[in-house]
């Protein structure tokens, strides 16, 4: 939604620098998780080097690799939506899915180069979800986001959100039907086990993506019933630390995964009570780190702005910053 508004206002080309920065941030998070894996012995240095080149499987980090590349495809997807409507975006997502399904039936290429091909198209089920399969969820998210944008009276939240709820109900019904079909075909216990332990994900199975769409849509549908302006001050204060997780999702996800990787080497609860205590401690630590990051971010931004302003006072750097695309500075 945010990128779509800016694309309509400033053109899709104006989004390229912002998307490049966000993609680089996701890649940096991916490298941080990969470094934690190497440091704790989960990967060798050689495996980490290949992973840096997107030719490796980084446990807890593959989704960051996915976003780092998927964000680069937002500009063509937005251009497609602005020119031909949201239906064209869904059609593009469906086409990439069908193409990946056909390619996935071919023998996997030799490693390590083959892992990059597996990441793109899902060969052999390593490093899933593959980019081509995952674009279906990206396309679906763009369609749902479009339904939140319309010409409605300012402040009329219920009118604005009604189309969004209707589309969410369609997604819940469709994804729920697919999940039910997988449960019938595999058996309820086997299907649940395959989802929990990542078998469906590693296969780029339609059930994995349907479960994700169902869960996300159900949560959004439930949250759309609440108006944050009507929350009591006490409840709003209690929820504020959790809201920081949404505002700084990339940091929370990266820091949380690093904490999981390091913590698994240090603590191994042997009882259910110990495991539950570790879960609560882990969640509290992630919330605390995200809150600290949220408080520190304005100071980081001020220091960055000051550094840029200082660079403008350096003649050579100032001239370079004033160059326009295509100029050589002669």
Image (cartoon, rainbow, N blue to C red):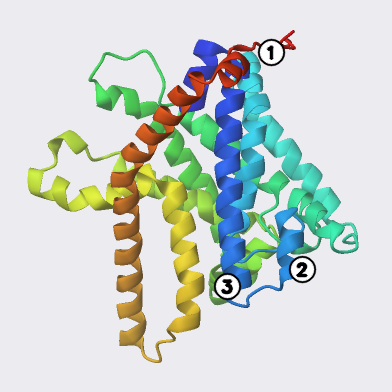
Compared to residue 185, the image places residue 103 above or below, namely above
Element at label 3? loop
- The quarter of the image holding the C terminus is top right
Q: Are marks 2 and 1 in contact (CB under 8 Å)?
A: no
Residue 306 in percent (x, y) is at 40, 28
Q: Is residue 56 visible?
A: no
Residue 104 in percent (x, y) is at 82, 55
Q: CA distance from mark 2 to mark 3?
A: 27 Å
Q: Give neighbour class at mark 3: few <14, some 14-19, many 20+ (Cα, 10 Å).
A: few
Residue 152 in percent (x, y) is at 32, 15
Compared to residue 293, the image places residue 161 above or below, namely above
Element at label 2? helix
Q: Earlier in the sequence, mark 2 or mark 3?
A: 2
Q: Nearer the viewer, residue 137 or 207?
A: 137
Q: CA distance from mark 2 to mark 1?
A: 39 Å
Q: Earlier in the sequence, mark 2 or mark 1?
A: 2
Q: Give neighbour class at mark 2: few <14, some 14-19, many 20+ (Cα, 10 Å).
A: few
Q: Which residue is mark 2?
A: 46
Q: Earlier in the sequence, mark 1 or mark 3?
A: 3
Q: Give neighbour class at mark 1: few <14, some 14-19, many 20+ (Cα, 10 Å).
A: few
Seen at 57% across and 73% down, the residue is 197
Q: Is residue 270 visible?
A: yes
Q: Are marks 2 and 3 in contact (CB under 8 Å)?
A: no
Q: Which residue is mark 3?
A: 197
Element at label 1? loop
Q: Nearer the viewer, residue 232 or 186?
A: 232
Seen at 9% across and 49% down, the residue is 234
Q: Which residue is mark 1?
A: 325
> What label does residue 19 carry, if any?
none
């Amino acid at each position: 939604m945010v990128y779509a508004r800016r694309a309509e206002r400033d053109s899709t080309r104006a989004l390229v620098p912002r998307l490049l920065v966000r993609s680089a941030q996701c890649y940096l998070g991916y490298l941080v998780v990969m470094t934690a894996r190497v440091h704790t012995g989960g990967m060798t240095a050689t495996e980490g080097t290949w992973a840096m080149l997107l030719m490796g499987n980084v446990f807890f980090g593959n989704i960051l690799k996915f976003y780092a590349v998927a964000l680069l495809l937002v500009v063509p997807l937005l251009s497609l939506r602005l020119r031909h409507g949201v239906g064209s975006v869904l059609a593009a997502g469906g086409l990439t899915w069908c193409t990946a399904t056909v390619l996935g039936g071919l023998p996997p290429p030799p490693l390590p180069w083959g892992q990059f091909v597996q990441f793109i198209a899902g060969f052999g089920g390593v490093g899933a979800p593959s980019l081509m399969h995952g674009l279906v969820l990206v396309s679906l998210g763009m369609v749902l986001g479009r339904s939140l944008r319309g010409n409605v009276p300012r402040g009329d939240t219920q009118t604005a959100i009604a189309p969004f709820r209707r589309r969410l109900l369609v997604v819940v019904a469709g994804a729920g039907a697919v999940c039910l079909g997988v449960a019938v075909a595999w058996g309820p216990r086997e299907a649940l086990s395959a989802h929990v332990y990542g078998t469906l994900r590693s296969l780029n199975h339609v059930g994995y993506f349907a479960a994700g769409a169902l869960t996300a849509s159900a949560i959004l549908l439930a949250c759309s019933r609440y108006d944050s302006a009507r929350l009591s001050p006490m409840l709003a204060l209690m929820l504020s630390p959790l809201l920081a997780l949404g505002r700084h999702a990339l940091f929370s996800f990266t820091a949380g995964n690093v904490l999981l990787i390091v913590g698994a080497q240090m603590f191994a609860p042997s009882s259910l009570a110990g495991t539950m205590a570790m879960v609560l401690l882990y969640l509290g630590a992630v919330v605390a780190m995200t809150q600290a990051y949220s408080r520190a971010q304005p100071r980081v931004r001020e220091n960055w702005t000051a550094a840029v302003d200082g660079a403008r006072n350096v003649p050579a750097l100032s001239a370079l910053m004033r160059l326009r695309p295509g100029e050589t500075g002669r």
